[in-house]
Amino acid sequence: MSLLRIEGLGLRFPNGVTALDGVDLALEGGEFLSLLGPSGCGKSTLLRAVMGLARPDTGRIAWAGGSRPRVGVVFQDPTLMPWAGVIDNVALPLRLAGLDRAAREKAALAAIERVGLAGFERAVPRELSGGMRMRVSIARALVGDPDVLLMDEPFAALDEITRLRLDDELRALASARGTTVLFVTHSVFESVYLSSRIAVMTPRPGRIAGTLAVKRPAAGDFRATADYARQCGEVSALLGRVMAA
Amino acid sequence: MRGALAARGAPLIVGLLVLAAWEALVRLNDMPPYILPAPSRIAATLWSDRAILLVSLAVTLKTTFAALVTAALSSLVLAILFRQSRWIERSLYPYAVILQVTPIVAIAPLILIYVEDPFAVMLVCATIVAFFPILSNTMLGLRSVDPGLEDMFRLQGAGRLQVLWLLHLPSALPHFLAGLRIAGGLALIGAVVAEFVSSTTAGGATGLAWRIIEAGQRLNVPRMFAALALIAASGIAIFALLTALSHIVLRRWHESERTG
Ligand SMILES: Nc1ncnc2c1ncn2[C@@H]1O[C@H](COP(=O)(O)OP(=O)(O)OP(=O)(O)O)[C@@H](O)[C@H]1O
Ligand SMILES: [Mg+2]
């Protein structure tokens, strides 16, 4: 049984814009699924519906076991509390869950370490670079050891060099724990590099036009292989057909 | 560096020039102190009358600070209530506006009738003058919360109190402090106005405004100026203190206090 089933999902905004119309998608436990589609097709809206922040008009969202598991989320912006230090920002989900200070600081320190920000625990967001802020946001998503990560173009605003490195770090983190990831992006290359499966969306109103499984080598630099280039080409071609239709 | 020094020095130089011109004007024309006292004479009066003036200063400052604290607490509570319920806001906010736009000199005589204790009269007047900027600023702050953070809190299942304490109040802090900075000066004005108004009745009013009236009746013009100088200096000191407070609290994270 799938971890998450989305069936016939439709969502229309009060101003009359139909963002989603008949989205069918299943998320399997342990997979890294990328949602790929043109700007404005409804990727963020779909993700917000999955998070429970937007109420769909039709269709349903069903989690295995009946209720939403613990999710870690990363938005397009770091969305940090500017008045709080890195450690308090990262520990926020635990604080809201009612953990005591010692327990949440221990877990937060571990998460900060995992995203490579050890030594910056006491810094406030303003004292960090854009890439470091994004990593704080990722650490906050990881801190509660969530079963599922939901990420909305987390690296879109970053430079190429930082993005490639964060892609690597995210892959390593997710595969080390077998975390299920639903990852929104509009980069073909990023989606192929990161994912085990890619779902391509149509222009608005968004639907799933098709999904592709990514074949990746067990070791080595995936980006340098001919397989990588070929699959990027396939995804681009599918995207092109979707846009033309 | 030189620019910063000049920026600080410039108003000081202007002040000294004006004082020097004033002193020269009085001395060259041989003006008597009851027409226009020279700055040196005012300074001498400040020193010779220090016992009386300092007691009055303490009275006025006590009213001012009590009013500022009362205004800060009551408007904070009101702003939080308004944030919790649109209905409470709609029902009460218009009255806050009415209280704000009605001149305090018109309200004060009424307060004088219904409130017995002279200190309470001063406190009420000064609080009425001071509370509105804090209220409206804090309300704005409580509503200008990053929507992404609101979503984040909702997603993590935050309760109402957690949202208020961990998100809304910190977000509103810069606005609250900006309101407090305006209110500091207004509380002083309110205290002085209240003293003026209540000076017509026999009461315990012995603040600086009362000293000005008393000295005026005795044609002790140097003392009037001395008391006025103390009021102005208090206003500047309050503003400087509240600015420093805002700087200390916000300097690490808020744009308004960015240095360099
Ligand atoms: N609050 C809203 N009210 C009205 N329309 C909205 C709202 N939010 C989004 N939309 C519309 O819904 C459509 C889908 O928006 P969404 O943000 O989901 O797109 P997206 O696929 O995430 O795009 P991008 O890649 O640029 O982030 C857009 O056409 C947008 O105009
Ligand atoms: Mg989006």
Image (cartoon, grey):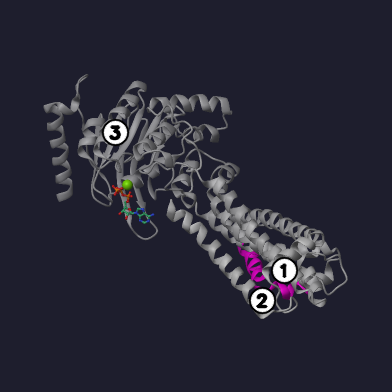
Residue B216 vertical placement versus B257 (above, below) = below
The residue range painted magenta reads B89-110
Residue most toward the right? B202
Q: Secondary structure at mark 2?
A: helix
Of B106 and A195, which appears nearest the observer?
B106
| Of marks 2 and 3, the one in the foreground | 2
Image spot of residue A209 (x, y percent):
22, 43
> How many angstroms separate mark 1 from mark 3 (CA)?
83 Å
Q: Quadrant of residue A152?
A: top left
Q: Which residue is mark 3?
A: A33
Q: Are marks 2 and 1 on the same chain?
A: yes
Of B48 and A160, which appears nearest the observer?
B48
Label number found at residue B41: 1
> How many angstroms separate mark 2 from mark 1 (CA)?
10 Å
> In the image, A101: left or right of A190?
right
Of B140 and A171, which appears nearest the observer?
B140
Query: Can residue B228 be seen here?
Result: no
Q: Chain of mark 2?
A: B
Q: Quadrant of residue B193?
A: bottom right
Amino acid on which the number 1 mark rests in the picture: Arg
